[in-house]
Image (spheres, rainbow, N blue to C red):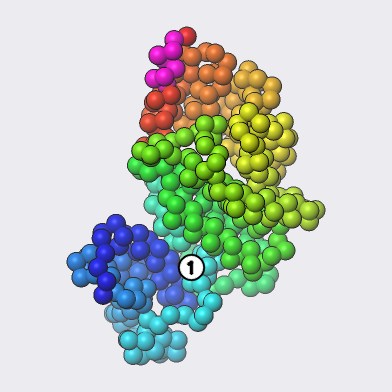
Amino acid sequence: MTSGSQPNVDALLRDLAPQVLGALLRRFADFYTCEDAVQEALLAAAVQWPEGGVPDNPRGWLIQIAFRRLTDHLRSEGARRQREQRAAMQIPADESTAAAEPARGHDDTLSLLFMCSHPSLSSTAAIALTLRAVGGLTTAEIASAFMVPEPTMAQRVSRAKKRIRSSNVPFRMPTEQEWPERLRTVLHVLYLMFNEGYTTSIGSALNRSELSTEAIRLTRTVHRLLPEDAEIAGLLALMLLTDARRAARSGPGGELIPLAEQDRSRWDQAAIAEGIAIVTAALSKGYVGYYQLQAAISAVHDEAADADATDWPQILALYGLLKQMTDNPMVMLNHAIATAMVYGPAAGLTLLESLDGDDRLAGHYRIDAVRGHLLEMAGDHRAAVGHYRAAANGTRNIPERHYLITRAARIAAEGP
């Protein structure tokens, strides 16, 4: 056993949870009971490890405990012999080897990612469930990603679990026919995982680097499986080009530094070069998709020597193409910013008016933050201060809130 601090144990358990759940699902194919068993194992670890130390094989320890909980549950349901015989075919009876590592090259987290896109679920429900199981996101964080109230998302996740159980369709990897549809769901999950890691929706930290790093790792793995798929490549490029700025996004005290004010010498040039090479190759394949266009926009930002050198007309043109592909309100919001940078803040503010009636953005802090920024550009400081303060009250990310409050205070001090 190795000793470890509580924060290290918490981070380790977050990383291991999807691996353990994936390992159990490959053997038992019952999401509901497997998830309950994993949660019990995680709770046992959270109690025992901080004092007794982390086991030499923490993943194996968790699988072993979860396996015991699961077999106890199955036994209590009166299905001991049938279920245990089925499990024994895949899990050695000797508990010292029951938690053995999977075959070399097997990735339980990746398997779980694909298994959670269950055929009985809608795409939205599958994405929500996967973010919970694979990303370890809370219901509140998932609700933020979907821009819906937390109780609404809690009901969706609960209904998704019940639907899987009642469908009697086991968890498994997709068939060849199911692969294209499942892949779209998986890519969306990875995209949302990365976004939540890059800018957390809730909490005192600006980002959760372990979450965005895991999203990049999994996307790389999917890209290796399907190297000719241009949208997978586009998503990987987008993540690399965006994550390349992470070190420059916050100051010594964790404060948010906006893109225009970042020290670009701190950007990861190797990640930028890799991302540009990947998206360039993907765009050359002929098909241009959602993630490729976003990656191209990130590449334009990353290639600019400073904020003034940013090619905003090119970014505006790319957002115009994105608008033709999706009605995502965040795309519309970013299109308004790009319009303001090319044609002036009045043009951007006019576009924002068309979003005021969009229920998906009702009360969302980002629309206030963007409006405040454009009003500041237009010289209407009093109105800008009001919208910055409204945005600060709407965000649950503490560094974002501090940034918006500070910006409002600075503008107010400068006067109208």
Work out whether residue 93 or residue 33 is closer to the camera in this orientation and state it.
93
The residue at the point 33 percent across, 79 percent down is 64
> Position of 321 compared to 382: left or right?
right
Residue 325 placed where, x, y %? Answer: 70, 43
The residue at the point 35 percent across, 63 percent down is 12
Work out whether residue 339 or residue 365 is closer to the camera in this orientation and state it.
339
Q: Quadrant of the N terminus?
A: bottom left
SS of the residue under disc 1: helix
Residue 93 placed where, x, y %? Answer: 35, 90
Q: Is residue 181 above or below residue 408?
A: below
Magenta span contains residue 411: yes
Residue indicated by mark 1: 109
Residue 389 placed where, x, y %? Answer: 41, 23
Q: Decide: few, some or many residues near mark 1? Use Cα within 10 Å; few <14, some 14-19, many ≥20.
A: many
**In terms of image quadrants, where is residue 414?**
top left
Magenta-drawn segment: 408-415
Tell me if residue 33 can be seen: no
Residue 162 placed where, x, y %? Answer: 43, 62
Type of amino acid under label 1: Thr
The residue at the point 60 percent across, 71 percent down is 174
